[in-house]
Image: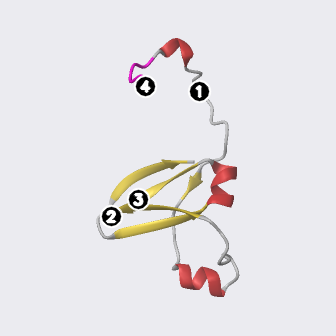
């Protein structure tokens, strides 16, 4: 059974970022990324969707940054990996 109780004594919170956040300011189509060699068919993606808008992130890149933030469908988002 998974506990839904939050125990603040078990949390380690820092005033500073441990990893460099990926601030998403621009994007490109998957087709263009593949044609430019920035993405391979074997690459795994982390996909987020809000409304009709979709963003995909390379899990290789997300393993470095761990978090990405930006706007999707006009609303702010934060995704953690």
In the image, farthest residue toward the bottom: 35
Residue 2 x %, y %: 43, 26
Quarter of the N terminus within the rendering: top left
Specify few, some or many for label 2: CA neighbours under 10 Å numbering under 14, 14-19, or 20 or more: few
Between the residue at mark 1 and the residue at mark 3, the CA separation in whole angstroms equals: 24 Å
Between the residue at mark 1 and the residue at mark 2, the CA separation in whole angstroms equals: 30 Å
Chain-order first, disc 2 or disc 4: 4
Q: Are marks 4 and 1 in contact (CB under 8 Å)?
A: no
Q: Are marks 2 and 4 in contact (CB under 8 Å)?
A: no
Residue 18 colored magenta?
no
Residue in the foreground of this view, choosing between 33 and 24:
33
Mark 4 lies on residue: 1
Mark 2 lies on residue: 73
**Residue 58 position (above or below residue 37):** above
Taking the spot 66% from the left edge, 69% from the top edge, the residue there is 43
Residue segment shown in magenta = 1-6
Between the residue at mark 4 and the residue at mark 1, the CA separation in whole angstroms equals: 32 Å
Indicate the quadrant where residue 58 lies.
bottom right
Dot label at residue 15: 1
Judged from the image, the secondary structure of the residue bearing numbered disc 4 is loop
Indicate the quadrant where residue 36 lies.
bottom right
Chain-order first, disc 4 or disc 3: 4
**Residue 10 position (above or below residue 52):** above
Specify few, some or many for label 4: CA neighbours under 10 Å numbering under 14, 14-19, or 20 or more: few
Residue 32 x %, y %: 58, 85
Dot label at residue 71: 3
Judged from the image, the secondary structure of the residue bearing numbered disc 1 is loop
Foreground: disc 4 or disc 1:
4
Residue in the foreground of this view, choosing between 46 and 77:
46
Specify few, some or many for label 3: CA neighbours under 10 Å numbering under 14, 14-19, or 20 or more: some
Residue 47 x %, y %: 48, 62
């Amino acid at each position: 059974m998974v506990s839904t109780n939050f125990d603040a004594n078990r949390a380690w919170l820092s005033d500073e970022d441990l990893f460099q956040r990926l601030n998403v300011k621009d994007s490109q189509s998957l087709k263009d990324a593949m044609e430019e060699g920035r993405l391979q068919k074997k690459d795994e993606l982390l996909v987020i969707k809000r409304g009709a808008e979709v963003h995909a992130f390379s899990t290789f890149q997300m393993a470095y940054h761990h978090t990405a933030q930006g706007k999707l469908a006009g609303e702010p988002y934060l995704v953690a990996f």
